[in-house]
Image: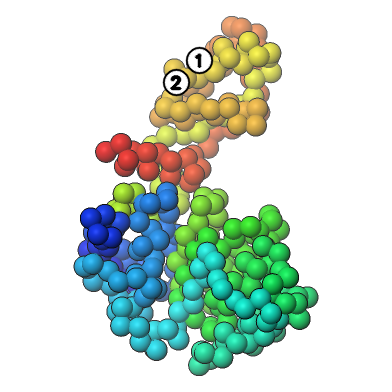
């Protein structure tokens, strides 16, 4: 049985159609990342699944329930981490977690939750004194305190430093290992690439493509070639012009030239031939599939153009 089944979901705001007939099915125990630019319709879709927004039409089942009914059984089995929350500033961290846990039938212990999110040393601190990253950890704590079967994570690591982001990723991995289903929205494409079993990309209210991160990378049909130019600025400009004639996209990133191409053999031949002819070293070569971020940009750009 699937955790979530959506058929023909439509959400209108007056004359504006924010979601235009989305179909998606998410398996139990799966981490599913829903991606899209601002205005793509992903937030409206997630809010319908959470029971926070009324749909215009379509069929939605979440853990066997219609979320629009607002049943206690469903509420007791899901956790939600919104982009912002309204926790009382004068509560301590431990008090806030305990208060939220009290509304669930089988909550985790406060100490366990604080340990999971890395807030044990801030248990007695007032919520109003927390830093942005600590406040986001508290949001995570409030989302998992009820031992949910299904967890919605909306931009969960915004404001985290790299170490805190890695710890949050480890938490999501652990929750998946325990059988929890996770629906994730994020603007960090490396986060989706690391965490998600499958990714769905929305654009203009429609789900334009979905699959595993590796599937989407392979489906792009292109290869990422990158290298450094050992010459001067004139040489860099010259080899960049050569690269621009060999692929779909060329850019300079941290001193490296990155080229997306469908014919990697021809590209390497042309670039190394230029290097020999001009006596300019090209080194630190890398040949790999494009990142999920590059695939995402291509998909969204193509959908918008269409």
Relative to 298, residue 88 above or below: below
Q: Is 148 on the left-hand or right-hand side of 237?
A: left
Q: Which of these two is toward me, 280 or 297?
A: 297
Q: Is residue 49 visible?
A: no
Displayed quadrant of residue 21: bottom left
Which residue in the protein does label 1 denote? 242
Considering the numbered disc 1 on the image, is that residue within a helix, a strand or a loop?
Answer: helix
Relative to 200, residue 60 above or below: below
Residue shown at 71%/69% (left/top)? 130
Residue shown at 54%/18% (left/top)? 240
Q: Quadrant of the N terminus?
A: bottom left
How many numbered discs? 2
Displayed quadrant of residue 9: bottom left
Query: What colour scheme does the image use?
Result: rainbow
Measured as percent of width and height from the top left, residue 39 is found at: 38, 51
Q: Is residue 89 visible?
A: yes
Q: Residue furthest right?
A: 121
Q: Is 121 on the left-hand or right-hand side of 34?
A: right
Q: Is 74 on the left-hand or right-hand side of 83?
A: left
Q: Quadrant of the C terminus?
A: top left
The label number, if any, that marks residue 246 in the structure image: 2
Relative to 215, residue 3 above or below: below
Disc 2 packing (10 Å; few <14; some 14–19; many ≥20): many
Considering the numbered disc 2 on the image, is that residue within a helix, a strand or a loop?
Answer: loop
Measured as percent of width and height from the top left, residue 239 is found at: 56, 15
3D distance between C-alphas at marks 2 and 1: 7 Å
Q: Residue furthest bottom?
A: 105
């Amino acid at each position: 049985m699937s955790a979530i089944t959506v058929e023909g979901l439509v959400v209108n705001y007056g004359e504006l159609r924010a979601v235009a007939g989305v179909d998606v099915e998410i398996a139990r125990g799966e981490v599913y990342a829903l991606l899209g630019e601002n205005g793509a319709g992903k937030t409206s879709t997630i809010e319908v699944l959470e029971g926070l927004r009324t749909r215009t039409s379509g069929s939605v089942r979440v853990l066997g329930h219609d979320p629009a009914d607002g049943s206690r059984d469903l509420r007791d089995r899901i956790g939600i981490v919104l982009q912002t929350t309204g926790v009382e500033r004068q509560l301590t961290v431990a008090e806030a977690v305990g208060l939220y846990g009290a509304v669930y039938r089988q909550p985790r212990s406060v100490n366990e939750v604080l340990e999971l999110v890395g807030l044990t040393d801030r248990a007695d601190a007032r919520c109003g004194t927390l830093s942005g990253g600590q406040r986001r950890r508290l949001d995570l704590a409030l989302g998992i305190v009820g031992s949910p079967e299904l967890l919605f994570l909306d931009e969960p690591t915004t404001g985290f430093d790299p170490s805190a982001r890695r710890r949050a990723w480890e938490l999501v991995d652990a929750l998946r290992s325990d059988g929890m289903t996770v629906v994730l929205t994020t603007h960090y494409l490396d986060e989706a690439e690391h965490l998600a079993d499958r990714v769905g990309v929305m654009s203009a209210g429609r789900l334009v493509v979905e699959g595993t991160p590796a599937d989407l990378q392979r489906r792009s049909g292109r290869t990422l070639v990158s290298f450094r130019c050992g010459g001067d600025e004139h040489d860099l400009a010259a080899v960049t012009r050569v690269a621009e004639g060999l692929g779909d996209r060329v850019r300079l990133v941290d001193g490296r030239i990155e080229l997306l191409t469908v014919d990697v053999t021809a590209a390497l031949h042309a670039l190394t031939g230029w290097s020999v002819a001009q006596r300019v070293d090209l080194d630190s070569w890398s040949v790999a599939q494009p990142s999920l971020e590059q695939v995402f940009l291509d998909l969204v750009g193509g959908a918008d153009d269409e």
